[in-house]
Image (spheres, rainbow, N blue to C red):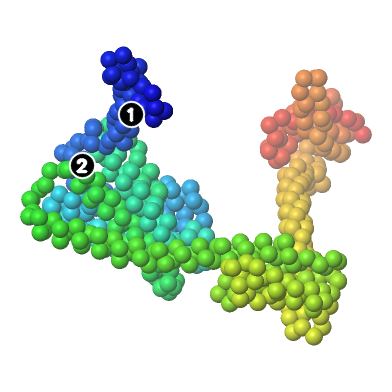
Amino acid sequence: MEKNETPKGMNGQNDPADVASQENIKNIWEQFKEFVLGLLDIRNGAEPKITIEGIKKDIPFKGHTAWILVFSIFIASIGLNTNSTAVVIGAMLISPLMGPILGIGLSVGINDIETLRRSFVNFLVMVFLSILTAFIYFKFSPFQTASNEILGRVEPTFLDVLIAFSGGLAGIVAGSRKEKSNAIPGVAIATALMPPLCTAGFGLATGNLSYFFGAMYLFIINTIFIALSTFLIVKYLRFPMARYANAARRKKVNRIVISVALLVIIPSVFSFISIMERTFYERDASLFLKETVIFPGSEQIKHNIDFEKKELEVYMIGNNVPVTAIEAWQAKIGDSKRLTGTKLKIRQGHDKTDELTNTLSNKVKEGVLQDLYAQNSKELSNKDAKILLLENELQRVTEMYKKDKVPLLDLAKEAKINYDGLEGLSFAKVVKTNLKKVEEIPVASAIWSKKLKKSVVNEQSKKLRKWLQFKLELDTLLIKQDYY
């Protein structure tokens, strides 16, 4: 038998074991395909009718929905203003902006002109009210500086397109299920519809139109690609058409949708490429400065990387770096393709001919002064707190002294007139304890003339005690008797 011949049985047929093995492999492959298709199948369990009703229900915008939008925009503006991510996320969770956007995608997909009109009108009203609310807040807010949360919404990139498209797909797929999930709030957070509108309001309020247009572009990206993803899933799941259109009309609608998507996505691609180039340039520049710009006895204290001018500016202190070393560093910049053409500037404290030596000195002085200012401010703050504490304690003691001080001389003169035979009067507070609690008891000592009878002294002492209690506003008072 030749080597390349297939083994056969006695009757010239293929070996039954091989046939059985091939059948098993085929069955396993079919089962695997069936498993994968079942795993990724989104048609199973979809409820087109319920989904359409649910989306249409969220389109109207009036009454409580309008106030919810105003409050959520106000909260989001505060979160952006204070750089609080948690507050912004909370505002996005209660925002009703997703309704009209899903309505636009749905209506285009099922050819429902009336729903498209209502969705578009409500969408425009929502956008106008959102920007107006944000504008009013930022116009009267004392904080007019752009926070990191605001700056993150003024330069959209291709990544924002991917986020909006993926988020929209997740939202409509989850919304088409019979079993509803929490995907819609997650989509609202991921696609971030509200922060761009708040940032647009900030741009108008502060007169920064670049912020306004950048934020509005991000919002348009999010809106169009959420609607586009809704349109695609509606088509894929074959939702029933509200009004059937001919083939030519369907092709025209599809071309318009694709054209709008491309018009929106192209600028974001260029923006994404620009940001990536800047990021890679700054990464390679930092690595070059860390690994190459090294000289014994000299240390970098500051560096500036200018992507636009293609410049690396380094401030160094310590031993003076010779020109030959600087030229060698400049030559090594060409080893990196991204850094090609970059100019290296070394600023040294020992180089008195350098016009920016003063800048270096000023930077160091500024840092020292800032440290001193921070330290002194902290010490002054601690001293102010101690002074305030002492003033409060002094005031408390003074008030206590005034309250506890007894006008003894005036009382004694008045008592001398009212009570015959009174020769002297003293007052004190006695602290006593029964080993369980401590009490402070006011005690008055009256000195009587020896000429008075004991019965008269006892009677006078009772009257004197009541009189002193009234004058001193005391609940209890002990009287001691003595003779002069």
> Disc 1 marks which amino acid?
Trp
x and y, in percent, of residue 426 in the image? 84, 38
x and y, in percent, of residue 112 in the image? 12, 52
Up the image or down, 410 lies above or below 127; here it is: above
Q: In what quadrant of the picture does the N terminus appear?
A: top left
CA distance for labels 1 and 2: 27 Å
Of residues 258 and 329, the one nearer the viewer is 329
Of residues 72 and 142, the one nearer the viewer is 72
Identify the residue at horizontal 74%, vertical 84% (top origin).
355
Along the horizontal axis of the image, is 41 left or right of 140?
A: left
Along the horizontal axis of the image, is 365 left or right of 222?
A: right
Q: Is residue 154 visible?
A: no
Residue extending farthest top: 10
Of residues 200 and 13, the one nearer the viewer is 13
**Which residue is under mark 2?**
237
How many numbered markers are drawn? 2
Question: Alpha-carbon neighbours of circle 2 within 10 Å: few (<14), some, or many (≥20)?
Answer: some
Residue extending farthest right: 484
Q: Is residue 51 visible?
A: yes
Disc 2 secondary structure class: loop
Of residues 55 and 233, the one nearer the viewer is 233
Identify the residue at horizontal 78%, vertical 41% (top origin).
415
Identify the residue at horizontal 20%, vertical 62% (top origin).
256
x and y, in percent, of residue 97 in the image? 30, 52
Disc 1 secondary structure class: helix
Along the horizontal axis of the image, is 47 left or right of 249?
A: right
Along the horizontal axis of the image, is 11 left or right of 91?
A: left
The numbered mark, 1 or 2, whose residue comes first in the sequence reads 1
Quarter of the image for residue 129 reads: bottom left
Mark in the foreground, 1 or 2:
1
**Which residue is under mark 1?**
29
> Disc 2 marks which amino acid?
Leu
